[in-house]
Amino acid sequence: MASGTSKLVIIGGGNMGTALVGGLVHGGWNPQEITVVEIDATKRAVLEADYGVNTSEVIVSAEGALVAVKPGDVANVCAQVSGLGIHRVLSIAAGISVRTLQDAAGASTKAIRAMPNTPALVREGVTAICGSDACTEEDFAWAESILSAVGVVVRVPESQMDAVTAVAGSGPGYIFLMAESLLAAAQEAGLPAHVADVLVRQLFRGAGILLAESSESPATLRERVTSPNGTTAAGLAVMESAGLRETMHNVVKAAAARSAEMGK
């Protein structure tokens, strides 16, 4: 049950909303300063039991609001948030422009748009944000203080949001498909399923950490692991001949175009 005015109201208790709750509580936020609005009674009970936050069936007043509902419901929720006197709203809905958010929220509420990705579920996400012309440095800092609980936050102009969506938002899907394909290839090469599974999962974990923590470029890291005429070189030659670079270019181009379509 919600009680009093919260520091933050999170509207939507789905996967991303729950990930943000977990990140905030893990990062030191007082759970009693967070209210999650969720119509599903079972989800509310889980959120209260697991994180100690307040929950509500209806939108309640708070110092700021994070909107984690379906894109088609975002404008209506922003209008409700503004009507309650909440002066900042942060939306994580894909394809909903800052202008749409700000128009729905009205002049009294500052609107910020964010594009997170699913690694936020394990507090390893990356989120890009942009805001309306009404937003100040304090508004951006507020949004960053929330989203940094589940990973890295970058600021971009809205004109770059479709590209962000295509690279980082959709990117986990590309990575998972590559892992899926490599797992199948490992088994076809004779490895038992359980061994192949361990190898592939740790491969992506280890290589990802190495890439994230290294100051060297991906190209340099690739070169360091590729001995002339070695096994890696043989495998990479197949990727190059198959046009992997061009394929990735087309993948990002297609995803960005779809993101732009969704925003219209």
Image: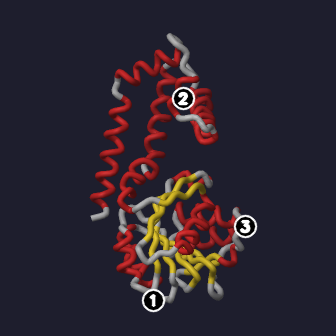
Q: Is residue 161 visible?
A: yes
Point 33% across, 33% down: residue = 246
- Element class at badge 3: loop
Question: How many residues crowd mark 3 within 10 Å: few (<14), some (14–19), many (20+)?
Answer: few
* Location of residue 207 with respect to 53 vertically, above or below: above
Point 49% across, 89% down: residue = 84
The outermost residue toward the top is 229
Q: Earlier in the sequence, mark 1 or mark 3?
A: 3
- Element class at badge 2: helix
* Amino acid identity at mark 3: Gly
Question: How many residues crowd mark 2 within 10 Å: few (<14), some (14–19), many (20+)?
Answer: few
Horizontal side, residue 165 vs residue 61: left or right:
left
Circles 3 and 2 in contact, beta carbons < 8 Å: no
What residue is pinned by disc 3?
28
Q: Earlier in the sequence, mark 3 or mark 2?
A: 3
Q: Earlier in the sequence, mark 1 or mark 2?
A: 1
- Name the quadrant of the N terminus: bottom right
Task: Check residue 83 in the rendering and tell me which mark sits there, or answer none.
Answer: 1
How far apart are the alpha carbons under marks 1 and 2? 53 Å
- From the top left corner, tell me how far across and down residue 94 is, in percent: 40, 62
- From the top left corner, tell me how far across and down residue 49 is, in percent: 69, 69
* Location of residue 30 with respect to 161 vertically, above or below: below
Question: How many residues crowd mark 1 within 10 Å: few (<14), some (14–19), many (20+)?
Answer: some
Observer-side mark, 3 or 2, equals: 2
Task: Check residue 220 in the rendering and tell me which mark sits there, or answer none.
Answer: 2
How far apart are the alpha carbons under marks 3 and 2? 38 Å
Observer-side mark, 1 or 2, equals: 2
